[in-house]
Image (tube, rainbow, N blue to C red):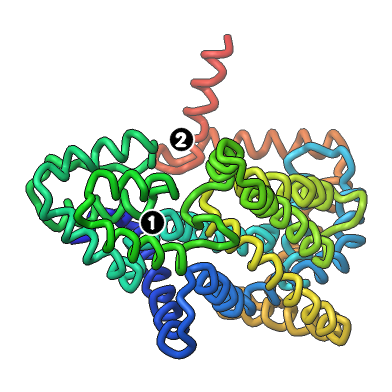
Amino acid sequence: MVLTQYSGKILGPIARFFGWIMNGIYMFFSNTFGVESIALSIIILTMLIYLCMFPLTLKQQKFSKLSQKMQPELQAIQKKYGNRKDQASMMAMQEETQKLYEKYGISPTGSCLQAVVQMPIWFALYRVFQNVPAYVSSVKGVFADLVNGIMNVSGYQNIMTKLTETYNLGVQTDFTVKDKTALYNYIVDVVYKLPSSGWDTLKDKFPDLSGVIDTTNTSVHGFNYFLGMNISDTPLAIIKNAASNHLYLILIAAILVPVFSYITQVLSLKLMPQAGGDNDQMAKQMKMMNNTMPVFMAFMCFITPVGLGIYWIAGAVCRIAQQFLINKHMEKVNLDDIIAKNQEKAKKKREKMGIAENQINNAARMSTRRNTTLSTLTEEEKEEKLKKAAEYTSKANPNSLAAKANMVREFNEKNNK
């Protein structure tokens, strides 16, 4: 029973999965090298995530390159139909555009796939970094002696409640519950979130546990602090606390987290090929998004845990290295070969759906012939054909579609009058 974990049906399992991986990384470095560091575990986890996402990233880069090559043809279609807004022209333009995308083997929404995949990862990691002991069992074990000692002190519930309120820890606790496992988890949550001054208060409230409190505090500083910052705190909270206590080095370190996030995001975006040309609407939207995204990420770094900022910075560094290698690879790729393969795939896909190439061509010729025939008729001939059609429908079987169409037409005419 782990009440401090997020219980969401989608993000909950993802967060627990990442917590399990982080615990394995943490234990590996602890047992092999004697290094206990959550920040290091986050960096290694980031590298593994981007390694797993590399095939998707490579596919994204091919999309961008093919989209650039496709732009002249796409713009020619747009120019061809210009401002024609009639239904026939719109449908014809849509059909030609769809065939063009099939030719190049890309999707209009292909550039959004990576962002869609990354969003649940970000939100799940936010949950993990916000409360590491709830997901990394090895870290939670560090608090065992202290928590058991606190639970043996009479009236500890009131003391822990006041500590939570005094330091505004932002954790949800209920020390009135009877479940001892829940109480254990709540105490871990509170102790894990305590600032440096909070540990001194803890010793004042539990003087008999001073030795255990000092040992636990030392362990927490060893694995959960990065450049003097608690990775579960937000840079904004650290800046406020550091400014009030004149801890200027920590204040600078907290400011550098969003600054480095912005710089690395900009560098990674500079290396990425952009879809579309300068005059393309999609290219303009992508350019605007690339300009605003680093600013947004820097802002988010102020109000989310430092651990998430470390993830974003490490991720941007991974993307920079990854993008450099991909750019070198893409220089050697023959786009014409890729287009030819995509055309063959599109053809096989249509044939599987029962639409052979000759059927498409025949349908196109029949449509063209029919449109040409109608366009060459004189006004008198058109009126004669419409008259004959009206006579035919007037004598239609009462149960036929033509008879029903007549009823609808007569109903509309009456209403219009």
| Res. 280 in view | yes
Mark 1 against mark 2, which lies toward the viewer?
1
On screen, residue 400 above or below 210 = above
Q: Is residue 380 left or right of residue 179?
A: right
Q: Which residue is drawn at 77% across and 37% down?
A: 86
Question: Which of the 4 quarters of the picture holds residue 323?
Answer: bottom right
In-front residue for pair 109/163:
163
| Res. 353 in view | no
In the image, what residue type sits under mark 1? Asn
In the image, what residue type sits under mark 2? Lys
Residue 166 appears at what percent x and percent y? Answer: 35, 34
In-front residue for pair 299/184:
184
The residue pinned by badge 1 equals 131
Q: Which mark is residue 47?
A: none
Q: Which mark is residue 404?
A: 2
Question: Which of the 4 quarters of the picture holds residue 361?
Answer: bottom right
Residue 369 appears at what percent x and percent y? Answer: 81, 59
On screen, residue 114 above or below 7 = below
Q: Is mark 1 on a helix, strand or loop?
A: loop
In-front residue for pair 61/93:
61
Quadrant for the C terminus, please: top right
Residue 125 appears at what percent x and percent y? Answer: 47, 60
Q: Which residue is drawn at 36% across and 48% down?
A: 200
